Amino acid sequence: AQSVTQLDSHVSVSEGTPVLLRCNYSSSYSPSLFWYVQHPNKGLQLLLKYTSAATLVKGINGFEAEFKKSETSFHLTKPSAHMSDAAEYFCVVSEPGGTSYGKLTFGQGTILTVHP
Amino acid sequence: GAVVSQHPSWVICKSGTSVKIECRSLDFQATTMFWYRQFPKQSLMLMATSNEGSKATYEQGVEKDKFLINHASLTLSTLTVTSAHPEDSSFYICSARDTFGAGANVLTFGAGSRLTVL
């Protein structure tokens, strides 16, 4: 079984300050981990993914995440927030390989608010 | 890059009617597609796995007779909400994996379909 816990339901930052969205996971396998962003009434856009290669993963729009197996964490960071980053972010875990790949388990989501 | 198109993007229907939502992979083939449901201010929940040429696999608690899934080709899966009721109002999102291409390890999501049942 696999699960994902996003530790903050809401995060509020000022424009230009760092962003930290926290995620812890639980998986029976070596997991694949993803961060997706969802803007209001829109679908999901992949920010980045970890699939057992480099533990520090760089994504789009300046986001990156570090896989820490010892802490079972996959926190999302960005050095400087933009107003356009305001959205909901989902941490997602997937069991690797085979037909089960794609059975994603979503975290509860973190709403990021960016203040001018 | 891989693109998944969902249609319609929003639909309003009367209680008791059926609604069909299409999910198309535009530039790749997908033997497997996934349907999710998202209630307001909640996360996405996997409803079912759609398998090309065979029956869909439903998650526990999802009524297969109510949410009919058909995956007749490598680029199209449909979700039909039968005899819709107001509690079926939700945001439905599909995703697909590029089965044969370089993007096989990445799921691409559609933009979602918002269903409102009156």
Image (tube, helix red, strand yellow):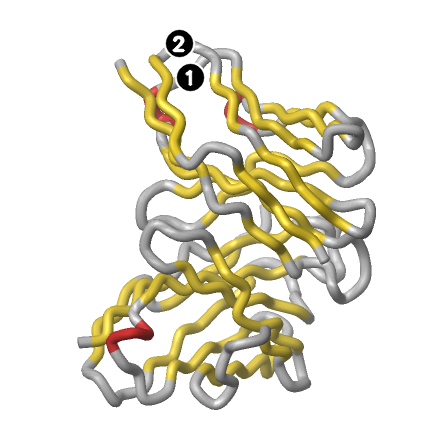
Q: Badge 1, how many Cα within 10 Å: few under 14, some, many 20+?
A: many
Question: What residue lies at 35% left-to-right and 13% top-to-bottom?
Answer: A15
Res B85 label: none
Res A81 label: 1
Question: What residue lies at 52% left-to-right and 85% top-to-bottom?
Answer: B64
* Image side of residue A81 versus residue A49, left or right: left
Q: Which kind of residue does numbered mark 1 sit on? A: Ala
Question: What residue lies at 52% left-to-right and 67% top-to-bottom?
Answer: B35
Q: Residue A82's quadrant in the figure?
A: top left
Mark 2 lies on residue: A16
Q: Quadrant of the C terminus of chain A?
A: top left
Q: Chain of mark 1?
A: A
Q: Residue B115's quadrant in the figure?
A: bottom left
Against B48, residue A80 (above or below) is: above
Q: Earlier in the sequence, mark 2 or mark 1?
A: 2
Against B27, residue A92 (above or below) is: above
Q: Position of residue B59 (x, y in %)?
A: 59, 73
* Image side of residue B55 versus residue B35, left or right: right
Q: Position of residue A60 (x, y in %)?
A: 56, 28
Q: Chain of mark 2?
A: A
Q: Position of residue B41 (x, y in %)?
A: 34, 50
Q: Position of residue B3 (x, y in %)?
A: 53, 53
- How far is the residue under mark 2 from the one under mark 1? 5 Å
